[in-house]
Image: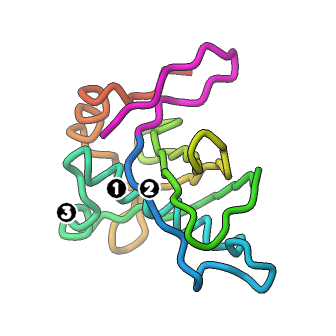
């Protein structure tokens, strides 16, 4: 994973790593020829899955253990439209980390231009929907990658 340069803003985003690139398909676009707004949530999911995979914690391993990342909140800020055949960089990182909850932050860029950013909030649950603690190995992997969010 490539880590993005650090920022010094007082409202700095959490450390984000470029985790994937995506070439916009014609099927991703709406009749106005821009990427349909809900498809950004798919890009977020690609980013989240690749972030976890890059940390050595693919979702497949969690599912095998009976753990799931239930989405409990989402926000997306659309800054610029993306179009057919654009190549987008998907960046992702952990913005907040609790015992059983985490927030994943995202940035979608086209070259040097920010297209969208946002976050998804998750609760780790078991097959019955009961909250479960995040594995300590996941925290260690975040720390090793320099992606552990700062304590509040």
Instruction: Check residue 10 for magenta coloring.
Output: yes
Snapshot quadrant of residue 38: bottom right
Snapshot quadrant of residue 63: bottom left
For marks 3 and 2, give the one nearer the viewer. 2
Q: Which span of residues is magenta-colored? A: 1-17
Q: Are marks 1 and 3 in contact (CB under 8 Å)?
A: no
Image location of residue 51, percent across then percent down: 35, 49
Q: Are marks 2 and 1 in contact (CB under 8 Å)?
A: yes
* Front residue (pair 74, 47): 47
Image location of residue 72, percent across then percent down: 59, 60
Q: CA distance from mark 1 to mark 3?
A: 13 Å
Q: Residue at x 70, y 55 (%)?
A: 76
Mark 2 burial class by Cα count in 10 Å: few <14, some 14-19, many 20+: many
Quadrant of the image for the C terminus?
A: top right
Residue under circle 2? 47
Instruction: Check residue 56 for magenta coloring.
Output: no
Q: Earlier in the sequence, mark 3 or mark 2?
A: 2
Lateral position of residue 70 relative to residue 39, left or right? left
Mark 3 burial class by Cα count in 10 Å: few <14, some 14-19, many 20+: few
Lateral position of residue 48 relative to residue 116, left or right? left
Image location of residue 73, percent across then percent down: 63, 58
Q: Are marks 3 and 2 in contact (CB under 8 Å)?
A: no
For marks 1 and 3, give the one nearer the viewer. 1
Image location of residue 7, percent across then percent down: 57, 19
Lateral position of residue 86 relative to residue 33, left or right? left
Q: Residue at x 18, y 70 (%)?
A: 64
- Residue 39 numbered tag: none
Q: Residue at x 49, y 51 (%)?
A: 89
Residue under circle 1? 50
Q: Is residue 10 above or below residue 78?
A: above
Residue under circle 3? 61
């Amino acid at each position: 994973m490539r880590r993005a340069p650090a920022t010094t803003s007082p409202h700095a985003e959490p450390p984000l790593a470029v985790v994937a690139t995506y070439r916009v398909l014609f099927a991703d676009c709406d009749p106005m020829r821009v990427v349909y707004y809900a498809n950004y949530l798919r890009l977020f999911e690609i980013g989240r899955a690749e972030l976890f995979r890059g940390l050595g914690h693919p979702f497949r391993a969690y599912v095998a253990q009976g753990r799931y990342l239930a989405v409990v909140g989402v926000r997306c800020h659309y800054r610029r439209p993306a179009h057919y055949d654009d190549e987008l960089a998907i960046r992702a990182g952990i913005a907040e980390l609790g015992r059983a909850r985490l927030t994943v932050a995202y940035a979608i860029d086209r070259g040097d231009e920010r297209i969208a950013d946002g976050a998804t909030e998750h609760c780790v649950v078991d097959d019955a929907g009961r909250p479960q603690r995040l594995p300590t190995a996941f925290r260690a992997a975040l720390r090793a990658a320099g992606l552990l969010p700062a304590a509040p």
